[in-house]
Structure formats: structure tokens, C-alpha cells
Image (cartoon, rainbow, N blue to C red):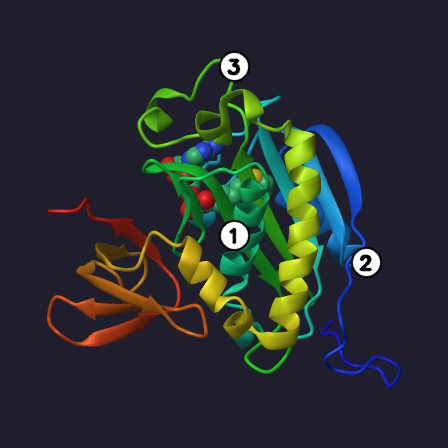
Amino acid sequence: MALSASPEMPDRHPIDIAWSVVSLAETTSTNDVARALAAAGAPEGTAVIADRQTSGRGRLGRAWHSPPGSGLWCSVILRPRLPLSQLGPLALVVAIAVYRAGQRWQATGLGLKWPNDLVADGRKVAGILTEAVGGSDTLPPEYVVVGIGVNVRRPVDGFPSPLQQTAGALEDLLGINCPTVGEFGTVMLAELADVYRTFVDDGFAGLQAEWLRANITTGRQVDVGGTGGGWSGFAEAIDELGRLVVRRDEGDVVAVAAGDVTLRRPGN
Ligand code: BT5
């Protein structure tokens, strides 16, 4: 079912999300729980948070390591009244909320890596997974579930071997000033309500400058993977639609809407 505007609800209604949080000790994936709740009619602003996920996932079916007591594993239900074609930048928007929450604790060194990562010292601290159900180029989706995974504390047993060189936690930056998972989640959700409202009102254009200030992707040589990827170039900018503008090694300029990007180290 696509949402349509009713006479009492103007198309561009101001959004003020009052979060309603479902807290779980353990689940497979908070995205799965949120999707089931959304399909059963749960309203925009429902957030599912679990202490541990047994099948946490990233994009393209990749696994997301979600041990207990260390990370914010959270999925929110959104019901944007924008067509699917305008929702591409949603992961970037949510990343700004996570970034802002980090700034609340002065997490300097945290940066946004296009499209959906927060990185510190070259290590991934957070990732975002957006799943839309229904919708089309002209119709809003029935709902969107946005999954947010943030390594707040280092896992007690450390990261497992495949992640030892690539994953990091806010605690690495903040030491004893690191918030608890709950404290971080509360601030992140408040910021998310704020950036989401800006996005619905003004599109990504309203957040583009803020994203650019926090970004570590542009001004770098990058390898572009994913569908249509397998090439390299220089990341020049993020455009108003949240696309990564890359000057390919072949010389032409391409705006990439979705995909994976690997940052080359300076000098490579
Ligand atoms: C992501 O995918 O970065 C999206 C992650 C979203 C996780 C949240 S947690 C709450 C909600 N419920 C879910 O089931 N998921 C969401 P992607 O860009 O595909 O990155 C996945 C890759 O990150 C993996 O292949 C690993 O290399 C790496 N990775 C896995 N777990 C990690 C962790 N805890 N910290 C840092 N990197 C990790």
C-alpha cells in the first residue's frame, strides 16, 4: 500500500518524530523486527534496539558483527512521503545524525565515508543499512527501515579476526569519556529526528554542506565497486542528490548514486 496525502495532511507536512523504542535483549536482526512491525502497521518513529544480534547484516547480505554490551544496534521505521527516487541519500542523512551524536562527546577524528560509513583512523565505527518496501519513481514506499550499527565500546573479547584491522569503536577516540550505548542512542535518535525533518523539508540540499564538512571521501583517489563499478578516479564532490561525483581515470565525470567505495591511501 502506498501512502497518499489525505486532505488534512498536506504533502510537505512538518515532521516531528516522537520515538517509541522497543528494547530487546537479543534478536536476529533489528531490521527484521522493525520490518515485521512496520508491515503490521507500526507508525513512523518506532525504533527497535537490541543488545545483541545473532544475524546482524550489512548491505548485500554481508554480516554485521553485533556482540552484546558494546554497540548500538538500532532500526527505525520511517514513512517518508517522498517517492523512492528521492530517497537515495537517506543513508547519508542518517550518517549525519550519528556523526552529530559523536560530536556531542567531541569525537574528533570521526569522518563520513560515502555512502554509509563512519570511520575513524581508517577503521569503520558505524554503518547504515536502508531497506525500503514498496514505492516507485513516483510513489512513496510503504515504509523504510533504516538500520544503524555503531560500535560504541570495544567488544569485551575484541573484534574477531576479519575485523581486527578494519573495525573501530567510539571508545578508541573517547577513552573514559565514552558514553554508554544507551546515552549514545538517546542523543543519536534526537539528532535523527532533526536531520530527517530537514531532509523531508529541503532534500539532501539542506544537509549537503554539513555532510561535506564531516566527509573524508572527497579530494581522494577512490576505487568504485558494486554494480557498475570496477573502476577508479578522483572523488571531486557530493552533489545535491547525495551522489558521489568522480572524475574517472579515463577523464569523464560520473555521478555515482549507489555502490561501494574504497579510499586509496595518499600516495597510492
Ligand atoms: C553496513 O553494511 O555498514 C550496514 C551495517 C548496518 C548494521 C545495523 S545494526 C542494526 C541493524 N540491524 C541489522 O541487521 N543491520 C543494521 P556494509 O557497508 O555492507 O558493511 C558490512 C561490512 O562491515 C562487513 O562485510 C564487515 O567487513 C564490516 N563489519 C561487520 N561488522 C562490523 C562491525 N561491528 N564494525 C565494523 N565493521 C563491521
**Circle nearer the viewer, 1 or 2:** 1
Query: Does the rendering let one see residue 130?
Result: yes
Residue at which label 2 appears: 41
The quarter of the picture where residue 79 lies is bottom right
- The Cα atoms of the two marked residues, 2 and 3, are separated by 37 Å
Vertical arrangement, residue 4 with respect to residue 39, above or below: below
The quarter of the picture where residue 224 lies is bottom left
Mark 2 packing: few (<14 Cα in 10 Å), some, or many (20+)? few
**What element does badge 2 sit on?**
loop
Q: Which kind of residue does numbered mark 3 sit on?
A: Val
Q: Which mark is residue 156?
A: 3
Q: Are marks 2 and 3 in contact (CB under 8 Å)?
A: no
Q: Which kind of residue does numbered mark 2 sit on?
A: Gly
Q: Is residue 139 left or right of residue 5?
A: left
Is ligand 1 closer than 8 angstroms to the Cβ of mark 3? no
Residue at 17 percent of width and 76 percent of height: 252
- Image coordinates for residue 157, horizontal then vertical, percent: 48, 13
Residue at which label 1 appears: 95
Q: Which kind of residue does numbered mark 1 sit on?
A: Ala
Sooner in the amino-acid sequence: mark 1 or mark 2: 2
- Image coordinates for residue 143, horizontal then vertical, percent: 68, 63
**What element does badge 1 sit on?**
helix
Q: Which mark is residue 236?
A: none
Viewer-closest of 135 and 262: 262
Vertical arrangement, residue 116 with respect to residue 179, above or below: below
Sooner in the amino-acid sequence: mark 1 or mark 3: 1
- Image coordinates for residue 70, horizontal then vertical, percent: 57, 24
Sooner in the amino-acid sequence: mark 2 or mark 3: 2
